Amino acid sequence: MLGASTLRLVVVDDHPLFVRGLELLLPITTNGRAEVVASTGDAAAAAALVNNCRPDLALVDLHMPPPGGIRAVAAIRRTTPRVRVVAMSGSADPGPAVEALRAGAEGFLPKTSEPEELLPPLLAILDGWAVLPAELLRAMLRPTRSAPVDLDGEEQRLLRAIAAGRSTVDIAEELHVSERTVKRMTAALLRKLRVSNRAEAAAIAGHSGILGE
């Protein structure tokens, strides 16, 4: 967790009023704990800007002119993998958000979020958690016909716990292992499922029917 130091953000968004609003309001609503250090409305320039600034987080609007926000997410993850990426959108369509998660975004926040509501989810993402609105998570978990996931009993228990939003501490208690072991098991599970974060793993749990077993 970041503690009391300032959370440095780069914003990739082609709506100047939205960017300016964040620049003005984030320092005020977070008591100086978050600030926008740079911004660009050009998705093609996003990766270079993030690489130069090395912020804690990059906020990327998904609905931008070509090459678009999703490609910007992927480019940032390639060039600066330690910088966490948060996708944002003013649309209720879950499709682009899911694509952004697959491209490497660690979370998604609607652009309707009030500035004073942003700090807790941004800190959670910085701490390694995937953050999604409940509506998006429900859409991702909606059952569909899918090939079964080949997991053993312990992996299925872990995947159910992840899909239920259980913390590392809670999962460790349930499985009677250390928190470090849970982190190692989770990393191995994500590799096996060929996903990059807990949100995508939860989606696979919903699609495969594991949650209903």
Image: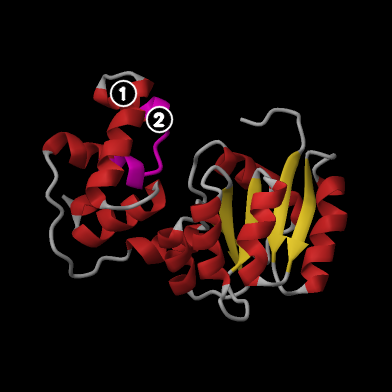
Label 2 element class: helix
Question: Magenta span has 182?
Answer: no
> x, y (%) of residue 192?
22, 46
Give the farthest residue toward the bottom: 65
- The amino acid pointed to by label 2 is Thr
Left or right relative to 189: residue 167: right
Please give the name of the residue rendered at 54% of the width and 42% of the height, measured from the top-left corner: 82
Label 1 element class: helix
Position of residue 184 relative to residue 137, above or below, is above
Judging by the rendered image, the residue that carries numbered circle 1 is: 181
Return the disc, 1 or 2, that comes first in the chain's sequence.
2
Left or right relative to 207: residue 213: left
Please give the name of the residue rendered at 68% of the width and 66% of the height, measured from the top-left corner: 112
- The amino acid pointed to by label 1 is Thr
Where are the magenta residues, as a range?
Answer: 159-170
Q: CA distance from mark 1 to mark 2?
A: 10 Å
Please give the name of the residue rendered at 51% of the width and 47% of the height, measured from the top-left corner: 81
Quadrant where the N terminus is found in the figure: top right
Judging by the rendered image, the residue that carries numbered circle 2 is: 168
Question: Magenta span has 161?
Answer: yes
Q: Can residue 73 be seen from the camera position used here?
A: yes
